[in-house]
Amino acid sequence: MLSFPQNFLWGAATAAHQVEGQNFNNEWWDWEQTPGRIKHGHSARVACDWWGGRWQDDFDLAQSLGHNAHRMSVEWSRLEPKQGEWDEDAAQTYRAKLKGLRERGMTPLVTLVHFTHPRWFMEQGGWLNKASLAWMERYTTRVVEAFGDLCNFWITLNEPNVYMVLSYVWNARPPGAGSLPQGLRVARNMLFAHYRAYEAIHRVQKDAQVSLAHQWRTLAPANPRSSLDRFATWQGNYVANEMFVRALTTGKMPFPLGRGETIGDGKMPLDYFAFNYYFVSHVTFDVSRPGSVFARLLPPTWLKGTSFEELTDVGDLAPNALYELLKRFARWNLPIYITENGTFDIGNDNQLPSIDNQSSYLVTHLRAIQRARQEGVQVNGYFWWTLVDNFEWDAGYWLKFGLYHLDVESQTRTKRPVADTYANIIRGNGITDALLAKYA
Ligand code: GAL
């Protein structure tokens, strides 16, 4: 048995736009209206119908699996639909959700911005506009004043690095700028905004625990003997990971985001580390991609021979890379939470036999976390991405990460094997030998 401590947080992670439906007031809704942008023409119009009230059913499901925590986000475009105007009805709905979690014995972890922004925010340039720092600070203050009696565990921004790359450096997501300089400006302003939000939360709530969720993109050279591949990997890793973590841990803005200037008072604006971790991606040097620091991600090897081969951005499975990451971050002496980790079902609905690849993913990654814990790394919680299949951004409903399968039309939820595997681990607060023998 590989054991975890008694107070370990076990849960799943969700994000407002991906589960709520009826989110018509942000840039994603606008983006979805152009054909060809979302796989199979899917839309987030209904999603998991949380705005229609089905969050209650899904929180019941999470409770039935023994979850004692849940990561969710609140939607800025609902709470502040017009600049400076707070929507009390929307706030009441989120209060009901937060109470709903507490009543079911789950600790809420709330993300303030998870990839979506009010239309008015984007119309004024979004994070390219320096005024966004003040907008974020005001919004954050309102959120903590409104929900602070129900939650003290916060994430300001979800994955500024992923947002920078997919929405600004590339054209994959709104606003689709295709500009590295713009991407860097956005990242810089988001890091400043995080600091402002961090301070604002602590002003309102003394016992708050605040972080920013960073998706650590482990990159490896496609050909380790090629110095060009190693160079592209080094650059990619610096831009996607290191410069963000450097800014957060040193309190200074590193090149090329800045010139070492101090962010706020120069202290580390983190009470804990929030890591999202999925896959390792292999990188090759590509001279035609100066705008992506000459790095090109290779298609994953583990999906060879399946209909998923066309996917280019999911990388390879390497729980060991998660262990290495945790060991490395132990030196900062902050508690660590894995705020997203998971994989999609490569069988269900895709004309492939279901092979429960999610359970092996879960068990091997938790084993890596437990090993790091045994060696003294303070990992305090784990959130599987995600509870019920949801709107996976540009992939629509095609990628199914849920513990539960969702039929969007009928809104029927069906439990996947991984849900039971996870429940088994939570119940025993550890990974049994039987599970290890079966999945690891
Ligand atoms: C993350 C993101 C989530 C989810 C996940 C799985 O980058 O934070 O919203 O989409 O990837 O693809």
Image (cartoon, rainbow, N blue to C red):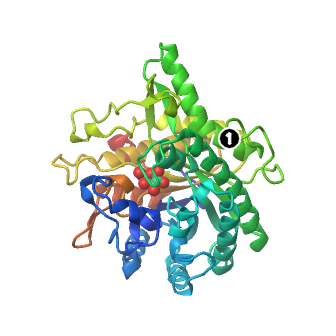
Q: Position of residue 56 (x, y in %)?
A: 41, 79
Ligand 1 is within 8 Å of the C-beta of the residue at disc 1:
no
Residue 377 falls in which quadrant of the image? top right
Say which quadrant the C terminus sits in.
top left
Q: Is residue 237 visible?
A: yes
- The residue under the point 70% across, 47% down is 248
Is residue 63 found left or right of 244 in the rendered image? left
Q: Position of residue 94 (x, y in %)?
A: 52, 79
Q: Label 1's element?
A: loop
Q: Position of residue 122 (x, y in %)?
A: 53, 62
- Give 325 or 203, whichever is nearer the viewer: 203
438 shown above or below 409? above
Is residue 349 found left or right of 290 in the rendered image? left
Q: Position of residue 148 (x, y in %)?
A: 67, 76
- Give 109 or 260, whichever is nearer the viewer: 260
Please identify the residue farthest to the front as the structure is shown: 124
Please identify the residue farthest to the right as the structure is shown: 265
Q: Report which residue position mark 1 lands on.
A: 257
385 shown above or below 408? above
- The residue under the point 57% across, 58% down is 125
- The residue under the point 32% across, 43% down is 438
Q: What is the three-letter code of the residue carrying label 1?
A: Leu
Is residue 385 found left or right of 311 in the rendered image? right
- Give 176 or 332, whichever is nearer the viewer: 176
Q: Is residue 341 visible?
A: no
